[in-house]
């Protein structure tokens, strides 16, 4: 497999074509962004930590029967993935109130949500990723009914698998964001699952162990990500 030209550079990852039209290489960079790219900083080791963290989680999800774009690790900071047509929506499930939900509804951070909520956001940095609903998705052709149903079903299935996985590491999965795409006519999970796109709290102290440490200037960002990995039994490789 040969890495060819850069197709796209996102805020934290770059995407390269390969000699196989169905496969892409994701390169996880050290760039860390918040507030829809208004703040970007380089954090040592972040590319390697997120790439390997994502590989570990995608493997767990795939073992649980959830179809994903993940194929294999290529290097500490690179993974091979299927080339999908992305659906421009972000699927968010919340088990506890935090972040924009707290700001929007004036509820208390940390309130447990039973049942968990599901929200859709449009992937559009210029507009600040506005919240949208399923009617918008259908009217603007972002996703069909059948695709929305599948995305919801898979997003909640991910919740079942990951709530348990993080609980076994003494952590609460507060919320997370997933992105999906279409590969050979099927909806599959894309993008990444890492502490950049979810909230994780220590179960006892409720200490934040995710990107809120960066958003809120709490420090120890990558150290917290590494601690999450350690609690899941991971070891990271930082070779260049
Ligand atoms: P929010 O509280 O800012 O709406 O975010 C909910 C969860 O989804 C949180 O874990 C962060 C994640 N998320 C992203 O990673 N990127 C995004 O663009 C959005 C809207 C949410
Ligand atoms: N992922 C988005 C960004 O980088 C939102 C966030 O994490 O705050 O800007």
Image (tube, rainbow, N blue to C red):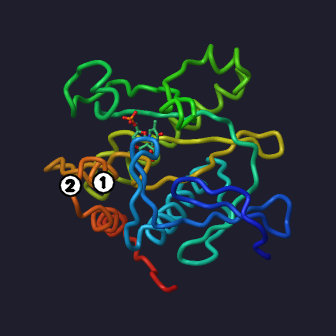
Seen in the image, is 62 located left or right of residue 127? Answer: right
> Which residue is found at the position 29% from the left and 33% from the top?
96
In the image shown, does 54 or 32 lie closer to the viewer?
Answer: 32
Q: Relative to 39, does residue 46 appear above or below in the rendering?
A: below
Residue at 78% over, 71% down: 4
Answer yes or no: disc 2 within 8 Å of ligand 2. Answer: no
Provide the secondary structure element on which disc 2 rests: loop
Image quadrant in which you'd find residue 122: top right
Expressed as whole percent of the image width and height from the top left, the position of residue 154 reads: 58, 37
User: Is residue 30 rendered to the left or right of residue 77?
Assistant: left
Q: Is residue 170 above or below residue 96?
A: below
Q: Say what secondary structure mark 1 lies in.
A: helix
| Residue marked by disc 1 | 214
Q: Quadrant location of ligand 2?
A: top left
> Residue 114's x, y, as percent?
32, 24
Name the disc covering residue 73, or none. none
10 Å crowding of disc 1: few (<14), some (14-19), many (20+):
some
Q: Nearer the viewer, residue 153 or 83?
A: 83
x and y percentages locating residue 34 in the rendered image:
39, 47
Give the image quarter of residue 163: top left
The residue that appears at 40% across and 41% down in the rendered structure is: 35
The quarter of the picture where the N terminus appears is: bottom right
Number of numbered discs on residues: 2
**What residue sits 77% from the left and 67% below the top?**
5
Separation (CA) of disc 2 from disc 1: 6 Å
Q: Which residue is mark 2?
A: 218
Assess mark 1: CB under 8 A from ligand 2? no
Q: Mark 1 and mark 2 in contact (Cβ < 8 Å)?
A: yes
Q: Position of residue 49 (x, y in %)?
A: 43, 69
Label 2: few (<14), some (14–19) or many (≥20) C-alpha neighbours in 10 Å: few
């Amino acid at each position: 497999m040969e890495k060819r030209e850069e197709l796209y550079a996102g805020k934290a990852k770059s995407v390269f074509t390969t000699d196989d039209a169905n496969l892409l290489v994701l390169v996880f960079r050290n760039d860390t962004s918040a507030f829809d790219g208004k703040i970007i900083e380089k954090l040592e080791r972040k590319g390697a930590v997120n790439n390997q963290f994502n590989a570990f989680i995608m493997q767990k999800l795939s073992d649980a029967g959830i179809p994903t774009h993940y194929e294999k690790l290529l290097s500490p900071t690179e993974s091979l993935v299927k080339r999908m047509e992305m659906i421009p929506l972000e699927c968010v499930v919340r088990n506890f109130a935090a972040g924009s939900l707290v700001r929007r509804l004036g509820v208390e951070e940390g309130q447990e949500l039973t049942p968990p909520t599901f929200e859709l956001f449009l992937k559009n940095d210029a507009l600040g990723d506005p919240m949208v609903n399923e009617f918008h998705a259908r009217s603007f052709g972002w996703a069909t009914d059948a695709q929305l149903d599948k995305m919801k079903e898979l997003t909640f299935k991910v919740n079942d698998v990951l709530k348990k996985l993080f609980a076994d590491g003494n952590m609460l999965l507060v919320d997370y964001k997933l992105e999906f795409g279409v590969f050979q006519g099927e909806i599959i999970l894309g993008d990444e699952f890492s502490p950049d796109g979810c909230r994780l709290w220590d179960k006892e102290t409720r200490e934040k162990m995710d990107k809120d440490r960066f958003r809120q200037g709490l420090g120890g960002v990558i150290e917290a990500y590494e601690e999450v990995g350690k609690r899941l039994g991971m070891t990271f490789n930082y070779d260049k």
